[in-house]
Image (cartoon, grey):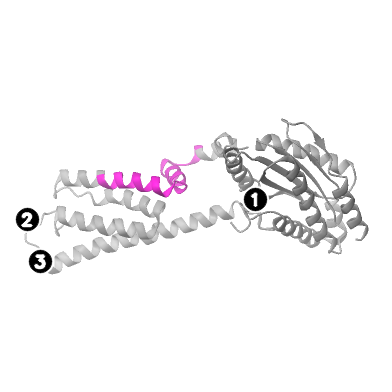
Amino acid sequence: MSLRSAPSHSTSADPDRRNVLAKWSPLEAALRRSADLNKAVAAVWLTLLWSAVLVVDDATGPHLSLNAVYLAPLCFTVWCLGRIAGLVFGLIVVAITLQLNGFGDGLSAQASTVATSTAAWNVGVRVFGVLFIILFVGAFRRTFNQERANAQIDPLTGLGNRRAFKRECSRLELASTRDNRILLCGLIDVDDFKAINDRYGHAAGDDVLSIVADALLSAVRPYDVTARLGGDEFAFCLAVRDAASAERKSGKIHDAVMAALIQTDYGATCSLGAATGVDVAETLRVADQTLYRAKDAGKSKWAFEVGPAQREVSLGARAPSERAQNATSRI
């Protein structure tokens, strides 16, 4: 998917991720892992957890209070399934616990007579506690989601950053294998970007980066993966049918970015290197080498290479590159 406004390979192999995991407390680790759980799977586990707590509460009788124990399944229900699910589960459990333990404080309804006002107060306090936990955890989850999204977005361009690119490419790699497709990975580099900064200022440089990001995003599908990896380097990853369609797509992306840069007053151009493959890490490595071939051939060029399995090299600096040169001459 496109990572705008919201995507190595396996994150479990990421050493930075392992270092972060080592610093999390058990509760933090549980929250982070459960945040990505499938809702159906989470619902099954939470139903079992709620059932276990209710069975224990029933077995211990009304004199042993387990009110605090109910906080764990309630919090995880809101965290994994949302506020509505938490409210439904919470109110059901309040009704069940009142049936099990009565309206008194640790005394069963059969063991004591409780005034109506006292019973109403105790019920109200329990319901208030449930609502407060639901609202508090729900707000925390929304903040968590927003901060996690912000941590994966490049603030200047709105594209995904390197971390998000690796994660989303990993997912795309699995999907492409399942759908019997190949990956098209590409890198885009703004030619002589430092010279643009030196001549026109850093504001102009930021403007060029935003233009490249907009053009890249408009040239791919909404579910394709795009990112700014850092500096003036951009990346994209797509699932395609074959090498021929991958080469055509690479040329179209380069043409789209070049066309957008031509409309500026900065004289900016870009180079693109793309490759196909089935493994993201290997395909990006080949694309990086292909980008250097394109830059060595001159400004505003693009180059393409098929994956290691086919090993037929096709430089895209023919017809597509001629269009790029013509576009450059009009700047």
- Queried whether the magenta region covers residue 43, the answer comes back as yes
How much space separates mark 3 and mark 1, taking CA atoms?
64 Å
Density class for disc 3 (Cα within 10 Å; few <14, some 14-19, many ≥20) is: few
Q: Which residues are magenta?
A: 22-51
Q: List x then y, in percent, for residue 19.
A: 55, 37
Q: List x then y, in percent, for residue 133.
A: 34, 58
Disc 1, SS = loop
Task: Decide whether the magenta segment is chiefly helix, strand or loop.
Answer: helix
Location of residue 255 (image quadrant): bottom right
Disc 2, SS = loop
Q: Mark 1 or mark 3, which is nearer the start of the sequence?
A: 3
Q: Which tag is nearer the camera, tag 2 or tag 3? A: 2
Point 77% across, 31% down: residue = 311
Q: Mark 1 or mark 2, which is nearer the start of the sequence?
A: 2
Point 88% across, 45% down: residue = 318
Front-lying residue, 35 or 27:
35
Density class for disc 2 (Cα within 10 Å; few <14, some 14-19, many ≥20) is: few
Amino acid type at mark 2: Gln
Q: Which tag is nearer the camera, tag 2 or tag 1? A: 1
How much space separates mark 2 and mark 1, taking CA atoms?
64 Å
**Residue located beneath label 2 in the image:** 110
Disc 3, SS = loop
Front-lying residue, 252 or 91:
252
User: Is 144 situated above or below 306?
Assistant: below
| Residue 224 - label | 1
**Residue located beneath label 3 in the image:** 115
Quadrant position of the C terminus in the picture: bottom right
How much space separates mark 2 and mark 3, taking CA atoms?
13 Å
